[in-house]
């Protein structure tokens, strides 16, 4: 009956759960599912230590929210106990709508539906279960609560979500370039005109935070081998979906079978509560279990892609500064058709192309404001002695092409 539980977190040490409601939310099956979804998808194929889950991240982000709110209270910002608890809940549940392998399968299992929309629907489910006890958390999550800074702590250019995932992903991957001055950043937060600002003394910690985020994108989140693995997984799921919707038998768990066999819209989820319940039963294990079955099915494409992923026989990937021409792509398609004896329409499963972008800071969406010692607010890009910030704000775009290693590349450009 003792709900004042303590988590021993490898990044922050002991995290105490002081709220009975938060403890009950964590215990709910919808939240426990996050234990079975890896935070970094297939990145463990590159960084073997990256086995941490969305559960770890959600607990960590909630902990950082409490530390940020404590810091603000210490500076005289009025925060009620209800606001404190509900802000913790809002960030605890901010990623609850992620499906298997997080971002990798966001638009293949559910076409055009963002995980934030699913998060909101699952939060509403929990709100009903807990007798409307999450009403304020839902407002904070949606940014409809009048005190806007609470939402900014959940989702902004400088939020506790980003602070936790940078610290945590750096820790578990061993990529030290992602290390940030977490204590310093949190201690320098303040609120002016209902907006989160950073006191001038913390400006170099913010510069380090943005630079660390840029480096983590290239070294971890957009690592070329990780991109290749994710594109293979997406092609695999699209093939399984194509076969299932054509009436072919594709072995899968009941919830996975449902989403392979149907194309649902957000309206479908809003009209049918059973759909969100079924999606809430999906996790990485559904996919891995299916892949182990699929390596032995008759469909050669599904079988080959499954075996390759299981055995880490990944597509080769090339990154370029310019997109490939249509002529080059058609040449590659022709070689794949010939190499694997496929129909032209099937060749798309054996290569992938597109672009990846890295923008550590996007001031046009919501800038980070610096509070000077004289009480003046400055956009961080305009702050003195920080030329790096303007460089970090620029979008860096690269184009990728993934294809099997045994396929020779007949490209002209």
Image: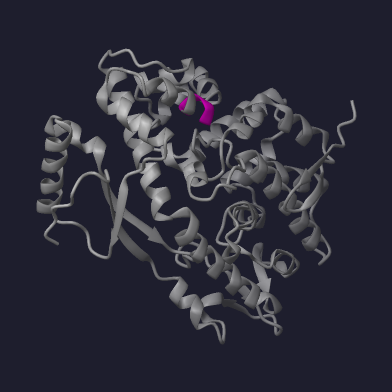
Residue 303 x %, y %: 32, 25
Depth check: give the residue in front, 203 or 11.
11
Horizontal side of residue 338 vs 223, given as left or right: left
The relative height of residue 288 versus residue 388 in the rendered view (above or below) is above
Horizontal side of residue 316 vs 7, given as left or right: left
Q: Tag count in the figure?
A: 0
Residue 80 x %, y %: 81, 50
Depth check: give the residue in front, 121 or 226.
226
Q: Quadrant of residue 231?
A: top left
Residue 91 x %, y %: 65, 45
At x 60%, y 30%, the residue is: 124
Q: Quadrant of the C terminus?
A: bottom left
At x 63%, y 34%, the residue is: 35
**Residue 83 visible in the displayed image:** yes
In magenta segment, residue 286:
yes
Magenta segment, which residues? Answer: 283-287
**Residue 113 visible in the displayed image:** no
Q: Quadrant of the N terminus?
A: top right
Residue 211 x %, y %: 53, 70
């Amino acid at each position: 009956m003792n709900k004042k539980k303590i988590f021993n977190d490898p990044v922050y040490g002991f995290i105490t759960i002081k709220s009975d409601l938060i403890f009950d939310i964590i215990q709910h099956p919808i939240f426990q599912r996050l234990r079975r979804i890896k935070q970094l998808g297939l990145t463990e194929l590159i960084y073997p230590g990256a086995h941490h889950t969305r559960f770890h991240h959600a607990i960590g982000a909630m902990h950082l929210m409490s530390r940020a709110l404590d810091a603000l209270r210490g500076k005289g910002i009025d925060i009620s106990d209800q606001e404190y608890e509900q802000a913790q809940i809002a960030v605890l549940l901010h990623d609850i709508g992620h499906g298997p392998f997080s971002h990798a399968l966001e638009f293949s299992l559910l076409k055009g539906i963002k995980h934030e929309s699913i998060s909101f629907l699952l939060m509403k489910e929990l709100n009903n279960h807990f007798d409307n006890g999450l009403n304020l958390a839902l407002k904070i999550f949606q940014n409809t609560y009048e005190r806007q800074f609470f939402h900014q702590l959940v989702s902004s250019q400088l939020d506790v979500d980003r602070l936790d995932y940078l610290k945590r992903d750096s820790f578990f991957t061993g990529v030290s370039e992602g290390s940030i001055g977490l204590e310093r950043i949190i201690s320098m937060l303040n609120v002016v005109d209902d907006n989160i600002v950073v006191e001038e003394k913390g400006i170099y910690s913010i510069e380090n935070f943005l630079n660390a985020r840029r480096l983590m994108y290239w070294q971890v989140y957009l690592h070329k081998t990780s991109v290749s693995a994710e594109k293979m997984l997406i092609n695999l799921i699209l093939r399984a979906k194509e076969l299932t919707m054509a009436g072919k038998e594709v072995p899968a768990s009941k919830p996975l079978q449902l989403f392979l066999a149907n194309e649902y819209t957000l309206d479908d989820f809003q009209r049918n509560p059973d759909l969100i319940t079924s999606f809430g039963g999906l996790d990485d294990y559904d996919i891995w279990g299916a892949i182990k079955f699929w390596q032995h099915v008759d469909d050669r494409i599904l079988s080959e892609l499954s075996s390759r992923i299981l055995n880490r026989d990944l597509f080769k990937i090339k990154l370029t500064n310019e997109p490939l021409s249509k002529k080059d792509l058609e040449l590659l398609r022709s070689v794949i058709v010939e190499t694997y004896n496929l129909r032209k329409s099937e060749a798309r499963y054996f290569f992938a192309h597109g672009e990846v972008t890295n923008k550590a800071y996007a001031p046009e969406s919501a800038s980070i404001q610096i509070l000077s010692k004289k009480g003046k607010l400055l956009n961080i890009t305009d702050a003195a002695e920080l030329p790096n910030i303007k460089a970090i704000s620029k979008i860096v775009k690269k184009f990728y092409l993934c294809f099997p290693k045994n396929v020779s590349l007949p490209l002209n450009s």
